[in-house]
């Protein structure tokens, strides 16, 4: 690669992205999400006196994300990463659907170049992992939900962090359309987790959607929790 390389200023993925359009403006070196939050790129086309980049590899954590390169749209083929070579552009628009819980748990990563061929193996990035916290209620509520059709394995650590003695009940559910969910074997009727204990789920089957639902085991006795997720793309 002999041309200019574009990524985030820190080289890190952009995290906590809400649903909606994310605009990558290579002319000015900015990434703007649907809430107006701006992340700076490491450089911009104006700095080099150029008007277009020519190749890009981009990762979006939701496999249903739409990636628009200039006026062209990539296929919604449940891929996590896309690489486009020999295609001139100055902006990229990524539309992230409102399918995730937490709603702002989406992530984005990209490397672009003014070279015609990027020649960069972006597939080495194979994990979407993070965590969320909350407090149970008397009824089941979704703590974590993602479209994971582009991943190969799904792992949840469901930690009852309650400082007292309040237990929580958890179900892990799957869906192929994001609307009709079914409780996985082993979680039918719910699994109780005592205060200070953790339940670990590791998938052995693939589905397009996974979610974790939690509630208080005893009515009125609400527990704090932390749910870690790790979605793995095996290379």
Image (spheres, rainbow, N blue to C red):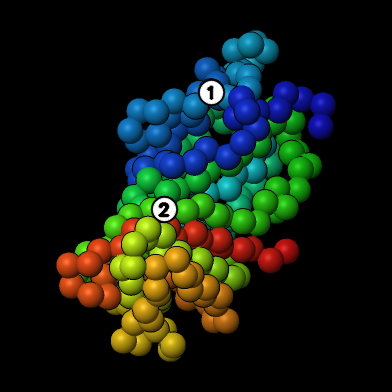
Q: Is residue 70 left or right of residue 216?
A: right
Q: Quadrant of the N terminus?
A: top right
Q: Residue furthest front?
A: 164
Q: Which of the 4 image quarters holds residue 173? A: bottom left
- Distance CA(mark 2)–CA(mark 1): 26 Å
In the displayed structure, 185 sits above or below 43; it is below
136 and 156: which is toward the camera = 136
Q: Earlier in the sequence, mark 2 or mark 1?
A: 1
Q: Secondary structure at mark 1?
A: strand
Q: Quadrant of residue 160?
A: bottom left
* Residue 214 visible in rendering: no
Instruction: Say the numbered circle drawn on residue 132.
Output: 2
Between residue 208 and residue 210, name the one nearer to us.
Answer: 210
**Eyeballing the image, is 13 above or below 152?**
above
Q: Secondary structure at mark 2?
A: strand
Question: Which circle, 2 or 1, is nearer the viewer?
Answer: 2
Residue 133 in the image: x percent, y percent? 38, 53
Residue 56 in picture, x, y percent from top left: 64, 39
Name which residue lies at 41% across and 53% down: 132
Camera-side residue of 193 and 44: 193
Q: Residue at x 74, y 39 (%)?
A: 118
State the residue at coordinates (55%, 54%).
129
Q: Which residue is mark 1?
A: 40
Look at the picture and state if 87 lies above or below 99: above
Q: Could you say where residue 92 lies in the image, as x and y percent from the top left? A: 50, 35
């Amino acid at each position: 690669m002999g041309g200019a390389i574009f990524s985030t200023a820190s080289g890190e993925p952009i995290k906590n992205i809400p649903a909606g359009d994310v605009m990558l403006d290579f002319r000015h070196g900015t990434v703007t999400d649907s809430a107006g939050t701006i992340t700076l790129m490491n450089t911009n086309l104006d700095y080099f006196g150029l008007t277009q980049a020519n190749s890009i590899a981009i990762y979006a954590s939701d496999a249903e994300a739409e990636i628009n390169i200039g006026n062209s749209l990539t296929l919604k083929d449940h891929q996590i990463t896309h690489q486009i070579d020999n295609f001139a552009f100055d902006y990229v628009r990524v539309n992230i659907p409102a399918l995730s819980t937490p709603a702002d748990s989406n992530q984005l990563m990209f490397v672009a170049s003014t070279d015609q061929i990027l020649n960069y193996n972006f597939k080495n990035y194979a994990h979407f992992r993070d965590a969320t916290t909350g407090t149970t209620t008397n009824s089941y509520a979704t703590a974590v939900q993602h479209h994971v059709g582009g991943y190969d394995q799904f792992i949840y650590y469901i930690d009852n962090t309650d400082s007292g003695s309040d237990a929580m009940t958890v179900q892990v559910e799957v869906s192929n359309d994001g609307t009709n969910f079914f409780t996985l074997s082993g979680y039918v009727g719910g699994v109780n987790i005592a205060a200070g204990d953790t339940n670990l789920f590791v998938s052995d089957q693939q589905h397009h959607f996974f979610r974790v639902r939690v509630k208080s085991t005893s009515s009125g006795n609400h527990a704090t929790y932390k749910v870690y997720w790790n979605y793995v793309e095996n290379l």
